[in-house]
Image (cartoon, helix red, strand yellow):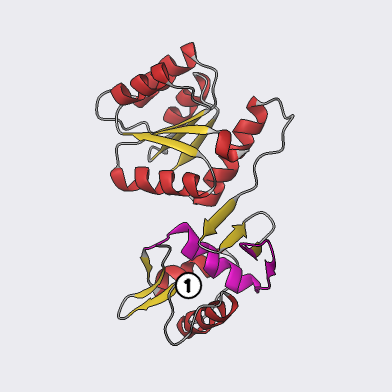
């Protein structure tokens, strides 16, 4: 199960580190996040690590050297997550034993699927990878099944567009998303809506989530900016 998996995120960009950590935690992983190789080695020496997500651009050591050292002593899955798209960097990382290589910017859902696949292979394929889920107060989103359920497990009937929009909100809780960002989320899911469609979809989601359309507590309008899923 995901909640038994300890993921170590090694990333010196605080924003990326926070996003990676938040997404993995929402999906049930235990996460330790550090910003340097020195901090990484301290955690590796003191705790059991099930998977490492390593940025190559660290402030104190070259990421390729860190990956080489880690692989020489440990067998846990190692995923490189970096802005370096150069073929030589990718080949060097894979040759020294990295299990996967993901270039920024990336889709968080793709990252999670890759993590799950690495963990499944590390277990010898004897366990089914944990399903990709996002949770917020009172509701759960199953990204694999494209399904939404309430806290009692009862299914919430949503359209494909509503699901894509709700998943975008759940991936960025308590952050304001502009209409352009939400339109982009729908476009990546295969839809091509107009700007006003966002308002319509938000209205529908409020009703289906039991959020008062006149005074919403969860899907809030931030005047002049967009919408936000409030989780606390």
Q: How many marks?
A: 1
* Identity of the residue furthest to the front in this view: 152
Which quadrant of the structure image shows residue 112? top right
Res 187 seen here = no
Q: Is 181 or 41 nearer to us in this picture?
A: 41
- Compared with 30, 61 (above or below) is above
- Compared with 119, 219 (above or below) is below
Q: Tell me the residue that label 1 is attached to.
A: 183
The boundaries of the magenta stretch are 149-174
* Identity of the residue furthest to the bottom in this view: 214
Q: Residue at x 49, y 82 (%)?
A: 212
* Identity of the residue furthest to the top in this view: 73
Which quadrant of the structure image shows residue 39? top left
Q: Is 199 or 84 nearer to us in this picture?
A: 199
Of the 4 image quadrants, the one containing the N terminus is top right
In the drawing, does residue 152 fall left or right of residue 195? right
Q: Position of residue 48 (x, y in %)?
A: 49, 22
Q: Position of residue 95 (x, y in %)?
A: 52, 20
In the drawing, does residue 177 fall left or right of residue 146? left
Res 182 seen here = yes
> What kind of element bears circle 1?
helix
Q: Position of residue 117 (x, y in %)?
A: 63, 36
Q: Residue at x 65, y 47 (%)?
A: 131
Q: Is 19 or 94 nearer to us in this picture?
A: 19
Q: Residue at x 49, y 61 (%)?
A: 170
Near mark 1 (Cα within 10 A), the count class, few <14, some 14-19 or many ≥20, is: many
Query: Is 190 included in the stretch rendered in magenta?
Result: no
Q: Position of residue 99 (x, y in %)?
A: 55, 27
* Identity of the residue furthest to the right in this view: 126
Of the 4 image quadrants, the one containing the C terminus is bottom left
């Amino acid at each position: 199960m995901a909640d038994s998996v300890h993921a170590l995120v090694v990333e010196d960009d605080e924003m990326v580190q926070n996003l990676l950590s938040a997404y993995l935690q929402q999906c049930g992983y235990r996460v330790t996040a550090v910003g340097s190789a020195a901090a990484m080695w301290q955690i590796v020496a003191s705790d059991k690590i099930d998977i490492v997500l390593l940025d190559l651009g660290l402030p104190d050591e070259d990421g390729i050297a860190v990956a080489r050292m880690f692989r020489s002593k440990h067998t846990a899955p190692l995923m490189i997550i970096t802005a370096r798209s150069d073929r030589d960097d990718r080949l060097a990382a894979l040759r020294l034993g990295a299990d996967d290589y993901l270039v920024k910017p990336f889709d968080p859902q793709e990252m999670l699927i890759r993590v799950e696949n690495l963990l499944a292979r590390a277990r010898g394929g004897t366990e089914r990878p944990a399903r990709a889920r996002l949770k917020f107060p009172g509701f759960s989103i199953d990204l694999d099944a494209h399904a939404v359920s309430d806290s009692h497990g009862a299914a919430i009937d949503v359209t494909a567009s509503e699901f894509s929009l709700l998943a975008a909100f759940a991936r960025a809780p308590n952050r304001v998303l502009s209409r352009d960002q939400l339109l982009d989320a729908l476009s990546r899911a295969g839809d091509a809506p107009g700007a006003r469609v966002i308002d319509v979809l938000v209205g529908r989601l409020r009703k289906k989530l039991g959020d008062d359309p006149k005074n919403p507590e969860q899907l809030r309008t931030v005047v002049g900016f967009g919408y936000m899923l409030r989780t606390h």
